[in-house]
């Protein structure tokens, strides 16, 4: 199906969210971080190529908590160009999704309503991104307390409207 490295590495990470982090491109090379002990062992294993092992991983789709098993995706051509790197300190896909949920819940807290939070989330490097109408002192202090002072991007745009302001009320 896909003979491109980035679209091929994504399903491996998404179908095995506890074993891999999100793929990135570094100097034109697709890097897939192996974060679990079993994925790191795969990187160090002998006998088969990384591509063959990644194909096995992509075919080894796991059912999620609700019992859904993702469909098979043929990623074999693209995986030949993916470099798997042992990276035990990198967040797994599961951890990234949970962190994104934490950022969203934090930003949507009623205590920050006066800041007018427009959007919130993280990027592929777990950098926190918030867009607000006004960066209030309370929000700034809470951001530092919760997330620290590095890997935080806060955009202030007093003219941007929140979604509920754009759609109006149902009255």
Image: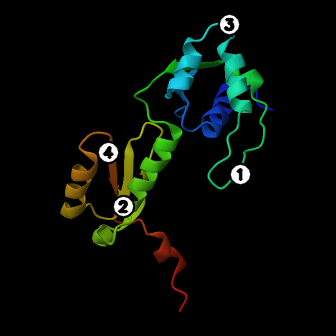
Which of the two discs, 3 and 2, sits closer to the camera?
A: 3
Identify residue for label 4: 152
Residue 28 in view, yes or no: no
Image location of residue 12, percent across then percent down: 65, 32
Q: Name the residue tied to disc 1.
A: 68
The residue where tag 2 is placed is 107
What percent of the width, then of the height, locates residue 46? 62, 7
Who comes first in sequence, dot 2 or dot 1?
Answer: 1
Residue identifier under label 3: 47
* Residue at 55%, 24% in the rendered image: 38
Instruction: Relative to 131, say whether 31 is above or below.
Output: above
The residues tagged by marks 4 and 3 sit, at their Cα atoms, a distance apart of 43 Å
Give whichever of discs 4 and 1 has the lower sequence position: 1
Is label 3 in a helix, a strand or a loop? loop
Provide residue 131's location: percent of width, then percent of height: 38, 57
Q: Are marks 3 and 1 in contact (CB under 8 Å)?
A: no
| Mark-to-mark CA distance, 2 and 4 | 13 Å
Q: Nearer the viewer, residue 43 or 74?
A: 43
Q: Is residue 72 left or right of residue 33?
A: right
């Amino acid at each position: 199906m896909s003979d491109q490295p980035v679209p091929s590495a994504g399903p491996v990470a998404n179908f095995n969210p506890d074993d891999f982090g999100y793929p990135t491109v570094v100097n034109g090379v697709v890097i897939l971080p192996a974060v679990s002990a079993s994925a790191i062992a795969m990187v160090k294993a002998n006998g088969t190529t990384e591509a063959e092992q990644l194909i096995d991983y992509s075919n080894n789709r796991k059912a999620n908590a609700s019992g859904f098993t993702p469909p098979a995706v043929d990623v074999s051509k693209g995986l030949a160009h993916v470099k798997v790197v042992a990276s035990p300190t990198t967040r797994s896909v599961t951890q990234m999704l949970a962190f994104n949920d934490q950022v969203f819940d934090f930003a949507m807290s009623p205590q920050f309503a006066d800041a007018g939070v427009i959007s919130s989330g993280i990027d592929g490097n777990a950098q926190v991104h918030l867009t607000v109408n006004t960066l209030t002192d309370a929000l700034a202090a809470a951001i530092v307390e919760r997330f620290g002072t590095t890997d935080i991007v806060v955009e202030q745009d007093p003219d941007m409207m929140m979604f509920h302001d754009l759609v109006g009320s149902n009255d």
